[in-house]
C-alpha cells in the first residue's frame, strides 16, 4: 500500500481569489442583469433535458429540484428533503429516510414518499433512457413506509450509497402521467427546489424565477438567467460589455479581468480532467503499444503551464493528484526515449516521413475536439505535437458534438469527465467493459479484466483498505494499458460582478455551469449593502 496524501474535502475546496473592488454593478445588458434581484450568467452549454429521470441534476445542486440529501461547501452530505441523514441497517443493506415536514412541489402539491419511490423506480426501469442508471446498480428495492418514510434495500453493501441520494425527486402526479423519455416534463419540469423554470429558448438561454414558497426560504436572487454561449471569446466579450453578470471562462480569458473594477474571480479545484479517448476498435489508437507510447510522449506539465496558465494539475489517471484515493506511484514524466523503445519492440518502425508504420499501416489516427472550446483545442494541438515526436501522426479536427458522437467508437476524442463524491462515481462509467459504447459511458470501449475486477471489488466492499487496494490496482493497470491518454485536471475559473455576498465554490465535477460554479448556492446569496 502506498503512502497517501490524506486531505479532507475542505482542503481541496476551491480558492476564491483575485480581484476585489468597491463594486459598481455592470449595466446588466438586455436582460437587466444589474437590476436588484436579477443575475445573468454566461455558460458554454445547455442540458438536453431538465428531467432527473433522464439524468439531469443527478449529482445534486439542481435549482429546480432537491434530493433526499445535498452537499455543503465542503462536499459533506447534509439533509435536504430528508429530515436527517439515513438510518443504516442490516450491515449496510438498508437505508431509511424520513421526509421533511411540509415540503411542497412548486405547483402546491405535497411531497410524499411515493414521489421518491416513483423517481428511483423509473430511473432504474430498463425502458427509461437514463445512461446513468448503473450508478444505482446496488438498489434491490425501494418502497414507501407510510407517507413520510422511504426504505432502500440493497443487493450488496455499497459504501457510497448515501451520496447517490442527492438524486432529484420528481412529482409522480405529473411525471407519472407521461412517458419519461418523451413527455413534456423534460422541458417543463416541476420540483421542490428554490427556483422554477420560467422559460427556455433552446440554444439561447434558460430563465428561472425564485420559488417564493421554497421550504428553505425564498431566495433573494429573484431571477436567474443562464445565457448559452458556446464560444469562450464571445462569452468573455459579453461579460466585459456588461451583457452578463458572470461567466465561466478558461484560465487565460479569466486572467484578462484581473484589473477590472467591480469584478471578482473565483477559482475552483475539480475532478474535471481532459483526456484523449483511444477507441479499442481503431487499428492504431487501439494498439496497446501505441497507447503506452502516447502516454509516455505527452508533456503534461507543459500543458498545465502553457494551456491552463497554471490553473490545474497534470493528470496521470482519472483521479487528481490531491485525491485521497490517488496512487502516488503512478506519477510519470515525459519520456520520448522509452516511447520509442515501446514502439520498436511492438514492430512500429520509423519511416522516412517521420511517421512509424507496422505491416504497412501508418501510425496515424484522427482526434476530434468540440468546436469553440479553446481549452480542448489547445490540448489537442499540444497532444498532436508531442505524439509527432514519437512518430505518431495525430490529425486534429474540430466538429460539433452532433458530428463527433457517432464517430466516438472509431475515432479519438478530446474528452472531459470527472465526478466528485467517491471514486466509484467517475471510474465505473468511464472504464467498466459492461458500459462500453453506452453513449458517453466508456466511450473508448475499454475492456480490461483487471480493471473490471478492481471496479467490482471496490464497488461491493465497505472495507476502506480493500477499496484502496482495488483502486491502486486499477490505476496501475491503466498505466500498462491506457484506454485514454490522461492529460490535465482543470481548475474551473469564473468571473462575476462583485455585488452579492455568500458566494463560495465547491470542489467540482466535470459538469459545471448550471449546477457547479459560485452559483451552486445562489438561493443563499445576499445583496451587498
Image (spheres, rainbow, N blue to C red):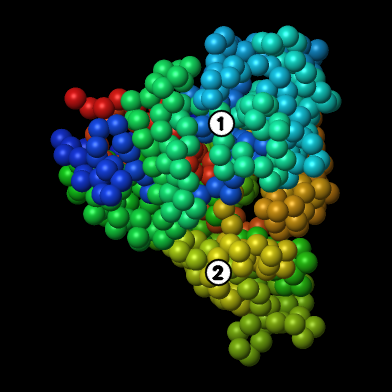
Callout 1 crowding tier (Cα within 10 Å): few <14, some 14–19, many ≥20: many
Depth order, front residue of 79/326:
79
- Quadrant holding the N terminus: top right
Whole-percent x and y of residue 429? 71, 45
Query: Would you identify the image quadrant in which residue 97 lies?
Result: top right
- Quadrant holding the C terminus: top left
Mark 2 secondary-structure assignment = strand
**Residue 287 falls left or right of residue 399:** right
> What residue is pinned by disc 2?
399
In this view of the protein, can residue 458 be seen by the observer?
no
Depth order, front residue of 102/373:
102
Point 68% across, 46% down: residue: 182
Q: CA distance from mark 2 to mark 1?
A: 35 Å
Depth order, front residue of 169/317:
169
Whole-percent x and y of residue 146? 73, 9
Point 67% across, 37% down: residue: 53
Point 74% across, 52% down: residue: 438
Whole-percent x and y of residue 213? 45, 19
Callout 2 crowding tier (Cα within 10 Å): few <14, some 14–19, many ≥20: few
Point 65% across, 30% down: residue: 174
In this view of the protein, can residue 35 be seen by the observer?
yes
Residue 163 vertical placement versus 350 (above, below): above
Residue 15 vertical placement versus 524 (above, below): below
Depth check, mark 2 against mark 1: the one in front is 1
Residue 151 vertical placement versus 391 (above, below): above
Give the mark, 2 or 1, whose residue is nearer the N terminus. 1
Mark 1 secondary-structure assignment = loop
Q: Do tag 2 and tag 1 residues touch (Cβ < 8 Å)?
A: no
| Residue 190, label in figure | 1
Amino acid at each position: 500500500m502506498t503512502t497517501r496524501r490524506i486531505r479532507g474535502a475542505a482542503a481541496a475546496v476551491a480558492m476564491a481569489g483575485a480581484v476585489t473592488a468597491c463594486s459598481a454593478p455592470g449595466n446588466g445588458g438586455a436582460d437587466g442583469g444589474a437590476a436588484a434581484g436579477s443575475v445573468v450568467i454566461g455558460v458554454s452549454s445547455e442540458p438536453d433535458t431538465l428531467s432527473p429521470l433522464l439524468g439531469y441534476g443527478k449529482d445534486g445542486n439542481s435549482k429546480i429540484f432537491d434530493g433526499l440529501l445535498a452537499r455543503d461547501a465542503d462536499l459533506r452530505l447534509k439533509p435536504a428533503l430528508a429530515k436527517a441523514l439515513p438510518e443504516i441497517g442490516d450491515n449496510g443493506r438498508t437505508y431509511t429516510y424520513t421526509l421533511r415536514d411540509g415540503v411542497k412541489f412548486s405547483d402546491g402539491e405535497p411531497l410524499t414518499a411515493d414521489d421518491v419511490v416513483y423517481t428511483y423506480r423509473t430511473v432504474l426501469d430498463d425502458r427509461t433512457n437514463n445512461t446513468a442508471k448503473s450508478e444505482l446498480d446496488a438498489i434491490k428495492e425501494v418502497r414507501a413506509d407510510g407517507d413520510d418514510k422511504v426504505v432502500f434495500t440493497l443487493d450488496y453493501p455499497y459504501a457510497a450509497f448515501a451520496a447517490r441520494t442527492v438524486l432529484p425527486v420528481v412529482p409522480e402526479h405529473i411525471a407519472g402521467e407521461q412517458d419519461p423519455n418523451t413527455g413534456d416534463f423534460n422541458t417543463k419540469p416541476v420540483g421542490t427546489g428554490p427556483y422554477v423554470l420560467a422559460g427556455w429558448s433552446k440554444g439561447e438561454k434558460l430563465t428561472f424565477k425564485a420559488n417564493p414558497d421554497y421550504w428553505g426560504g425564498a431566495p433573494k436572487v429573484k431571477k436567474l438567467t443562464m445565457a448559452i454561449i458556446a464560444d469562450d471569446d464571445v462569452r468573455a466579450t459579453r461579460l466585459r460589455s456588461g451583457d452578463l453578470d458572470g461567466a465561466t471562462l478558461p484560465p487565460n480569458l479569466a486572467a484578462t479581468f484581473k484589473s477590472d473594477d467591480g469584478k471578482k474571480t473565483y477559482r475552483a479545484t475539480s475532478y474535471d480532467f481532459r483526456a484523449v479517448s483511444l477507441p479499442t476498435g481503431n487499428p492504431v489508437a487501439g494498439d496497446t503499444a501505441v497507447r503506452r507510447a502516447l502516454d509516455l510522449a505527452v508533456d503534461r506539465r507543459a500543458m498545465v503551464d502553457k494551456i491552463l496558465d497554471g490553473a490545474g494539475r497534470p493528470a496521470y489517471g482519472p483521479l487528481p493528484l490531491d485525491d485521497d484515493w490517488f496512487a502516488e506511484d503512478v506519477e510519470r514524466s515525459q519520456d520520448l526515449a522509452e516511447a520509442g523503445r515501446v514502439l520498436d519492440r511492438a514492430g512500429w518502425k520509423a519511416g522516412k516521413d517521420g511517421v512509424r508504420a507496422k505491416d504497412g499501416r501508418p501510425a496515424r489516427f484522427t482526434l476530434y475536439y468540440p468546436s469553440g472550446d479553446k481549452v480542448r483545442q489547445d490540448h489537442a494541438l499540444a497532444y498532436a505535437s508531442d505524439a509527432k515526436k514519437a512518430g505518431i501522426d495525430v490529425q486534429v479536427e474540430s466538429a460539433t458534438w452532433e458530428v463527433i458522437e457517432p464517430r466516438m467508437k472509431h475515432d479519438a476524442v478530446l474528452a472531459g469527465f470527472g465526478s466528485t463524491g467517491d471514486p466509484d462515481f467517475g471510474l465505473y462509467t468511464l472504464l467498466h467493459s459492461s458500459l462500453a459504447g453506452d453513449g458517453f459511458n466508456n466511450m473508448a470501449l475499454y475492456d480490461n479484466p483487471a480493471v473490471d475486477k478492481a471496479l467490482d471489488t471496490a464497488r461491493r466492499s465497505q472495507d476502506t483498505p480493500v477499496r484502496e487496494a482495488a483502486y491502486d490496482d486499477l490505476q496501475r493497470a491503466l498505466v500498462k494499458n491506457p484506454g485514454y491518454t490522461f492529460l490535465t485536471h482543470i481548475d474551473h475559473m469564473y468571473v462575476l460582478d462583485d455585488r452579492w455576498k455568500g458566494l463560495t465554490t465547491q470542489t467540482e465535477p466535470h459538469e459545471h455551469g448550471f449546477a457547479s460554479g459560485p452559483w451552486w448556492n445562489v438561493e443563499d446569496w445576499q445583496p451587498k449593502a
